[in-house]
Image: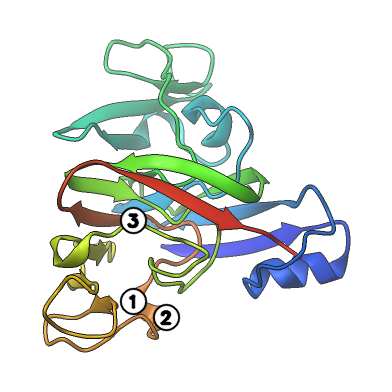
């Protein structure tokens, strides 16, 4: 999956601050922009919406790019996937253009910041979905992280940022939490979180299977517009993130 990002602020300094992920005093209440997520032909991509429209339904945020009924979304429910289908004016039914469930009812699913969804493009040409909206600032509570498998995204467009960064603050719980990226053809390597309650290794952070730290390896962490898979141990954890753009 290839992504292209442009975050537009009231001044060039604000835009630069977003792309370098510096969180300091806010001089503008709103930072808006867009993210282009390209889904190659004949492939699945695990994508994220990291810009808030205020009403982040599928039929609000995933409308620029899907092609007729060839484009399918797979939404994780916690135990299985629900299928959604995109229909446009080239299709005989239903109408109007948009996302529908298997019974042809308009989709009511959301794709909020911190959520991720699989999009299948079985066509012979790549499609590009343009996501637009506002960068959420301040302290926000995101999708609760439930026990077991979760398909999530970093809530803000911070490419290559580890999940335990103060700008992400994913609520990991010792070595019971694992992280895997989606490669486009399957899941990547598994990484494990260790904290002060674990016997080893140290310091707290994410490690590979050989106990090598990976927090400082940007290529391990999600690209802009990308989702990931985590396995969460213990009970449901609230995800609270504080983020400001200067």
CB under 8 Å between discs 2 and 3: no
Q: Quadrant of the C terminus?
A: bottom right
Q: Position of residue 216 (x, y in %)?
A: 40, 85
Return the residue nearer the eye: 57 or 145. Answer: 145
In the displayed orientation, state which residue is furthest to the right: 11
Quadrant location of residue 70? top left
For mark 2, does the 10 Å Cα neighbourhood hold few (<14), some (14 to 19), or many (20 or more) residues? few
Q: Is residue 63 above or below residue 7?
A: above
SS at badge 1: helix
- Camera-side mark, 1 or 3: 3
The spot of residue 123 in percent (x, y) is 35, 46
The residue singled out by tag 1 in the image is: 220
Q: Residues within 10 Å of mark 3 (few under 14, many from 20)?
A: some
User: Which quadrant is the N terminus positioned in?
Assistant: bottom left
Q: Nearer the viewer, residue 153 or 34?
A: 153
Q: Nearer the viewer, mark 2 or mark 3?
A: 3
Residue 233 in the image: state x and y as whole percent. Answer: 15, 53
Residue appearing at x 38%, y 68% in the figure: 164
Q: Is residue 70 left or right of residue 61?
A: left
Residue 65 horizontal/vertical position (percent): 53, 42
* Front position in the image: 165 or 54: 165
Give the residue pinned by disc 3.
171
| Residues at circles 2 and 1 in contact by the CB criterion of under 8 Å | yes
Answer left or right for 14 relative to 179: right
The numbered mark, 1 or 3, whose residue comes first in the sequence reads 3
Identify the residue position indicated by label 2 in the image: 218
From mark 2 to mark 3, how far is it between C-alphas?
19 Å
């Amino acid at each position: 999956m290839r992504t292209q990002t442009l975050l537009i602020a009231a001044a060039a300094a604000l835009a630069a601050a977003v792309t370098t992920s510096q969180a300091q005093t806010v001089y503008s209440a709103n930072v808006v922009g867009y993210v282009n997520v390209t889904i190659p032909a004949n492939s699945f991509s695990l994508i994220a919406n990291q810009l808030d429209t205020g009403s982040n339904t599928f039929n609000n945020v995933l409308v620029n790019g899907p092609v007729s009924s060839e484009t399918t979304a797979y939404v994780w429910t916690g135990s299985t996937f629900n299928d959604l289908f995109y229909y446009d004016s080239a299709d005989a039914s239903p109408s109007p253009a948009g996302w529908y469930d298997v019974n042809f009812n308009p989709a009511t699913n959301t794709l909020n910041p911190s959520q991720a969804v699989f999009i299948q493009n079985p066509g012979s040409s790549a499609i590009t979905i343009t996501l637009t909206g506002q960068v959420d600032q301040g302290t926000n509570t995101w999708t609760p992280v439930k026990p077991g498998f979760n398909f999530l995204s970093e809530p803000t467009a911070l490419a290559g940022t580890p999940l335990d960064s103060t700008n992400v603050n994913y609520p990991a719980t010792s070595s019971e939490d694992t992280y895997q990226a989606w490669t486009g053809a399957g899941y990547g390597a598994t990484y494990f979180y260790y904290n002060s309650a674990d016997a080893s290794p140290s310091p707290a952070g994410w490690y590979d299977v050989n106990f090598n730290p990976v927090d400082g390896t940007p290529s391990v962490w999600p690209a802009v517009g990308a989702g990931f898979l985590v396995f969460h141990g213990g009970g449901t954890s609230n995800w609270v993130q504080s983020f400001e753009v200067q």
